[in-house]
Image (tube, rainbow, N blue to C red):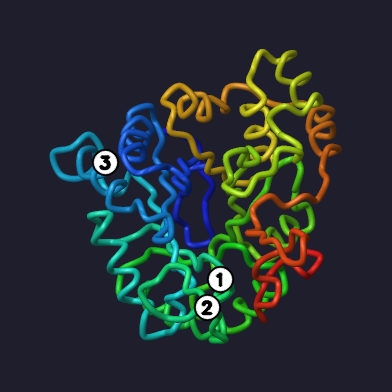
């Protein structure tokens, strides 16, 4: 069993999970099977990844009565998409995800972003000029609807994703069921020291998405730095006879941050879980800390007047204008 962190709810959440964002159709089922077969007990999903039905096909082969694993041995997370923030849409969205995954409950259901988009079937509702259609419904109202999912047994816990510290506090101030997790981009180039300290202070577990820097993100430009090729990480990896990816994951785990690296390559899926049989020294930790650039990779950007700008920065609930 892979080591886990205990959430404030008492649930155990495995420290390493399989991420499924950007896993192409036809690949994600095999990736989930490979992960479960090599010892993963935590799968991270989202409606917006448009592949939950395929994750569900893999779960159906491995989890449940007469299968290799009991349902309570696998921790499954999913996320409510931005077009489903209206309170009356929340339960239906959760039930759709459960139907795709073939499950009767989620271990954790997150609000994917604090920003609401226009309601409807389109994942990315756009105006004629290509800009996204926003909605101004407040994430606090969405949260109240998510709390009823816990009351109905559809989700064992609920949480947040891409929320800044102020927005987290805003939710906590009205919460009947407190957020258990805030899932955010976090890696050595964006170490999130302040947000992590804040999460700890309010009893929220931080989960790192794109913990390896998401080199395959759709909008990467060729001149951006590649985290996995950083010389400082390479030096530590070489000395410990590990891969740079293993060093990065170990660094976050030692800070108490859950990691959900995505891969569809069975050998890498396995390597990403082989991070519990070594430790980084205080000097190694400091060395990894020192390469922080406060550089976000996962913010959709668009060209405006010849400049790359954050697509959603105009949204009233855009999270990344605050310092953390």
x, y percent for residue 304: 73, 66
Closer to the observer: label 3 or label 1? Answer: 1
Residue sitting at x 34%, y 69%: 94
Distance Cα–Cα, label 3 vs label 1: 36 Å
Kindly identify which numbered label has been placed on residue 251.
none
Asked if 78 appears above or below 283 in the picture, the reply is below
Q: Mark 2 points at which residue?
A: 127
Regarding mark 2 in the picture, which secondary structure is present there?
A: loop
x, y percent for residue 256: 65, 45
Asked if 8 appears above or below 193 in the picture, the reply is below
**In the drawing, does residue 105 fall left or right of residue 64?**
right
Q: Which of marks 3 and 2 is nearer the N terminus?
A: 3
Distance Cα–Cα, label 3 vs label 2: 37 Å
x, y percent for residue 115: 58, 75
Regarding mark 3 in the picture, which secondary structure is present there?
A: helix
Kindly identify which numbered label has been placed on residue 58.
3
Q: Which of marks 3 and 1 is nearer the N terminus?
A: 3
Q: Name the residue under label 1.
A: 130
Closer to the observer: label 3 or label 2? Answer: 2
Examine the image and state in which quarter residue 63 appears. Answer: top left
């Amino acid at each position: 069993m892979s080591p886990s962190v205990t959430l404030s709810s008492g649930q155990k959440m495995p420290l390493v999970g399989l991420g499924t964002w950007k896993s192409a159709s036809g690949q994600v089922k095999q990736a989930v099977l490979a992960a479960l077969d090599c010892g993963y007990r935590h799968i991270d999903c989202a409606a917006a990844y448009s592949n939950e039905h395929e994750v569900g096909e893999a779960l159906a082969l491995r989890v449940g009565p007469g299968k290799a694993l009991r349902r309570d041995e696998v921790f499954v997370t999913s996320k409510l998409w931005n077009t489903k923030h209206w309170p009356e849409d929340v339960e239906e969205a959760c039930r759709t995800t459960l139907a795709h995954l073939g499950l009767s409950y989620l271990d954790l259901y997150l609000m994917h972003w604090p920003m609401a988009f226009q309601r409807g079937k389109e994942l990315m509702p756009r105006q004629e000029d290509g800009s996204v259609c926003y909605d101004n419904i407040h994430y606090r109202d969405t949260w109240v609807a998510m709390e009823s999912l816990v009351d109905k047994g559809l989700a064992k816990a609920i949480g947040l994703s891409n929320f800044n510290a102020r927005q987290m506090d805003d939710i906590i101030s009205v919460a009947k069921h407190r957020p258990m997790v805030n899932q955010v981009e976090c890696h050595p180039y964006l170490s999130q020291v302040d947000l992590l300290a804040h999460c700890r202070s309010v009893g929220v577990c931080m989960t790192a998405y794109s913990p390896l820097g998401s080199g395959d993100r759709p909008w990467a430009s060729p001149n951006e730095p590649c985290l996995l090729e950083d010389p400082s990480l390479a030096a530590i990896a070489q000395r410990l006879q590990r891969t740079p990816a293993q060093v990065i994951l170990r660094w976050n785990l030692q800070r108490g941050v859950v990691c959900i690296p995505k891969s569809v390559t069975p050998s890498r899926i396995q390597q990403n879980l082989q991070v519990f049989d070594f430790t980084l020294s205080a000097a190694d930790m400091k060395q990894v800390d020192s390469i922080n650039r406060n550089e976000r990779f996962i913010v959709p950007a668009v060209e405006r007047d010849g400049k790359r700008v954050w697509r959603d920065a105009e949204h009233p609930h855009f999270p990344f204008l605050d310092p953390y």
